[in-house]
Image (cartoon, rainbow, N blue to C red):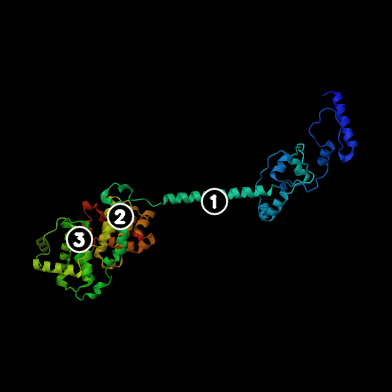
Amino acid sequence: MGRSDENSLGLIGSMNLQGGGGGGKIKTTGTTGPTRRALSTINKNIIEAPSYPYAVNKRSVSQRDGICNKPPVHRPITRKFAAQLADQKPQIHEEETKKPDSVSSEEPERIVIDVDDCDEEEGGDFHEPMFVQHTEAMLEEIDMEQKEIEMEDADEEEERVIDIDACDEKNPLAVVEYVNDMHTFYRKSENLSCVPPNYMDNQQDLNERMRGILIDWLIEVHYKFELMEETLYLTINVIDRFLAVHQIVRKKLQLVGVTALLLACKYEEVSVPVVDDLILISDKAYTRREVLDMEKLMANTLQFNFSLPTPYVFMKRFLKAAQSDKKLEVLSFFMIELCLVEYEMLEYLPSRLAASAIYTAQCTLKGFEEWSKTCEFHTGYTEEQLLACARKMVAFHHKAGTGKLTGVHRKYNTSKFCHAARTEPAGFLL
């Protein structure tokens, strides 16, 4: 720029100052350009104080960016302003909507104001806008909620219920379409297969000890004949239901047991033992006619009702829910057969006996308590509901090899049953 240009600018400045604050117009020749405010008006806006209190935190984003030409400065939220947020928010909104009278409708000259200068003019107390503080607080709260949701989703993923029938969809023998309805029916009708837990009080010539001896002997007979597992459970169910409603003398108790085994074999087995074999194992204490007469009496007393759920049907379903292996399966059946001998276990439903046996077997093998969400869903029992029954099973396990009733212990102490009787009892449950 030459000296003549500087003189011209000086002359224009002196003319503006002499014109006072009125901001008079300068006459120019040639084409008229865009209308602009006089420099005196702009200088006045810079030098004189604004007509409204100047505070950065009371301007909207568009106004502050237009004046400062800088992005908003984000600073950490302090407790002081977080506490004042609720009281100041309406006032902020109201003042943000206000437009200063001194702002012209014309496009203003862009004036750069340093934020540090603003701090000095306000005494060094530059505060962050309240809406910025509120936004950052909301973002932090959203982040915390998102983390909690992710943690809950992870827990649900770990504890989700497994579809135990997915692997059998193409197996017609698994009847996947009907299995849930079948077990729903079993749960509704299992009460019909139960007997009063004190029915032995009505027997004048029998007691619970005699019942235990009979069942312990039948477990050995069942094992020698290599019969199906379902046959054993149905045999014991028929005995209890018959003794609960019919008086029997002591010398006929073994006859009741043999006849119940014959009836169960006719219902469950493909190849039924002949009557002479049953008389032989009874040491020929009864004749063929006596066996057939007792068979007729028991069938009529029970009204030929042998289609009731026993613990066995629940055992198979619950073991599948527990994703059992051979060792867990054998140990679970060992636990529940120990309960078949014990008269006091008649107080529990068949489904609860089955679930408790599996729970006790899991604790015995793993050394700690474990009951998954899948087991709880399919059995309908929580861990707390099974503890009382499980503790009794552990006590039976402790004394299984002692005393006179050792038929179950001898059966499960063979290689066929993986020597399950030698497993150390889960004493920590007691």
Camera-nearest label, 1 or 3: 1
Farthest residue, direction front: 31
Q: Measuring 21% from the left and 74% from the top, which residue is drawn there? A: 203
Q: Is residue 405 left or right of residue 27?
A: left
First in sequence, mark 1 or 2: give its number. Answer: 1
For the residues labelled 1 and 3, the Cα–Cα distance comes to 59 Å
Q: Position of residue 133 (x, y in %)?
A: 65, 49
Residue type, mark 2 in image: Val
Residue type, mark 3 in image: Ile
Camera-nearest label, 3 or 2: 2
First in sequence, mark 1 or 3: give its number. Answer: 1
Q: Is residue 150 left or right of residue 396?
A: right
Q: Residues within 10 Å of mark 3 (few under 14, many from 20)?
A: many
The dot on residue 219 is 3
Residue 116, located in which quarter of the rendered image?
Answer: top right
**Residue labelled with disc 2:** 179
For the residues labelled 1 and 2, the Cα–Cα distance comes to 41 Å
Q: Quadrant of the N terminus?
A: top right
**Residue labelled with disc 1:** 145
For the residues labelled 3 and 2, the Cα–Cα distance comes to 29 Å
Under circle 1, the secondary element is helix
Q: Is residue 127 left or right of residue 202?
A: right
Say which of 4 and 27 sits in front.
27
Residue 5, located in which quarter of the rendered image?
Answer: top right
Residue type, mark 1 in image: Glu
Q: Position of residue 3 (x, y in %)?
A: 86, 24
Q: Is residue 31 visible?
A: yes
Under circle 3, the secondary element is helix
